[in-house]
């Protein structure tokens, strides 16, 4: 646990950070876009696509400006790794270009964001398989080898860190962290949980974080939880365990539906933004280092506004 402040990320200095919401669900349900494989990175190939992404991020950045917080800009690259890219007909060189273009877009957005500070650029990594099902069960070595490719691409850009979201196994989290350490870039791992507060492979959330830290000598900058409603994992936080201090961020779903139900849903369930904001305020009481607030499936800028209203205070670090 002694490595928590190893990385010189602005998040390590305290303060509070907003981030974005459910990018892909917003693009599909609000913008009416078709995203095969739930991949947003192909939008980077067109002027209109880049404009759509820019408008999305700038809408969220305006909330940070209103609340005097920092912001974590997550690249639209959750599916921009080898296996998913192959399904979309993209080669490794194509994917390297897409990942680089994503960070370049975010760097440009950061450069025109005015007084919002600090803004951290994160290379976003998704699971090799389906994040809801541990169906691509890898060893830690296999996960490291797979994710090292995308992480090396990010390490050659202006990205400040990499974040792996919606991971469902400890081995994949360990692999990401090891690959990032080898590439010399800070890493964050975000696990998803089912309605029982356990990872999709059955591991309790707290055990997953403890096992990941043990296997990596605490090398991750911090951990997050994403793609689950607070009701699904709140009970897992009802403890005095040390691992709670390692959870610095939450990107929850607005919907209380299970992953299986979300997979089958044909309409968006946006939940209740104000209620979600209050749920985050409760999480903040349970997570002593919670400082990065955003949303996941079914959320949009309204949810981030509500979360900011309930959680952000202007007196600095808490």
Image (cartoon, rainbow, N blue to C red):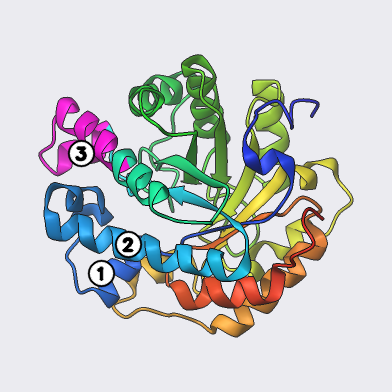
How many other residues sit within 10 Å of disc 3, few (<14), some (14-19) or many (≥20)?
some
The residue carrying mark 1 is 28
Reading the chain from its start, which is encountered first: label 3 or label 1? Answer: 1
Viewer-side residue, 204 vs 31: 31
Disc on the earlier residue, 3 or 2: 2
Above/below status of 272 relative to 307: below
Q: Is residue 195 visible?
A: yes
Q: Closer to the camera, 9 or 282?
A: 9
Mark 1 neighbour class, 10 Å CA radius: few under 14, some 14 to 19, many 20 or more: some
Q: Is residue 153 magenta?
A: no
The secondary structure type at the circle numbered 2 is: helix
- Residue 24 bears which disc, if any? 2
Left or right, 101 with reference to 121: left
- Residue 301's x, y, as percent? 45, 73
Extent of the magenta region? 82-102
Tell me the crowding category of disc 2: few under 14, some 14 to 19, or many 20 or more residues within 10 angstroms, Cα based: many
Looking at the rendered image, the disc whose residue lies closer to the viewer, 3 or 2, is 2
* Residue linked to disc 3: 85
| Residue under the image location 43 percent in, 34 percent down | 159
Report the Cα–Cα distance between label 2 and label 1: 6 Å
Quarter assignment of residue 264: bottom left
Quadrant location of the N terminus in the rendered image: top right
In this picture, is 190 found above or below 302?
A: above
Residue 25 occupies which quadrant of the picture? bottom left
């Amino acid at each position: 646990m002694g490595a928590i402040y190893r990385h010189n990320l602005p998040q390590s200095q305290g303060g509070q950070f907003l981030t974005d919401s459910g990018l892909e669900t917003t693009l599909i349900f609000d913008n009416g876009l078709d995203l095969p494989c739930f991949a947003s990175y192909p939008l980077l190939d067109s002027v209109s696509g880049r404009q759509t992404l820019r408008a999305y991020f700038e809408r969220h950045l305006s909330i940070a400006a209103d609340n005097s917080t920092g912001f974590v800009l997550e690249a639209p690259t959750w599916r921009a790794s080898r296996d998913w890219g192959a399904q979309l007909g993209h080669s490794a060189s194509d994917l390297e270009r897409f990942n680089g273009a994503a960070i370049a877009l975010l760097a440009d957005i950061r450069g025109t964001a005015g007084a919002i500070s600090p803004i951290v650029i994160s290379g976003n990594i998704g699971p090799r398989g389906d994040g809801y099902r541990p169906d691509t069960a890898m060893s830690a070595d296999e996960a490291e080898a797979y994710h090292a490719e995308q992480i090396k691409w990010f390490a050659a850009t202006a990205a400040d860190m990499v974040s792996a979201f919606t991971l469902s196994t400890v081995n994949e989290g360990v692999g990401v962290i090891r690959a990032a350490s080898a590439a010399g870039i800070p890493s964050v791992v975000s696990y998803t949980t089912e309605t029982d507060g356990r990872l999709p492979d059955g591991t309790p959330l707290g055990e997953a974080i403890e096992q990941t830290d043990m296997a990596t000598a605490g090398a991750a900058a911090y951990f997050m939880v994403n793609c689950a409603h607070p009701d699904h994992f709140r009970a897992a936080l009802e403890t005095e365990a040390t691992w709670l201090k390692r959870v610095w961020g939450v990107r929850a779903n607005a919907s209380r539906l299970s992953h299986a139900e979300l997979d089958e849903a044909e309409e968006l369930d946006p939940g209740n933004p104000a209620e979600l904001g209050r749920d985050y305020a409760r999480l903040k009481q349970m997570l002593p280092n919670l400082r990065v607030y955003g949303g996941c499936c079914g959320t949009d800028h309204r949810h981030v506004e509500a979360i900011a209203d309930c959680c952000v205070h202007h007196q600095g670090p808490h």
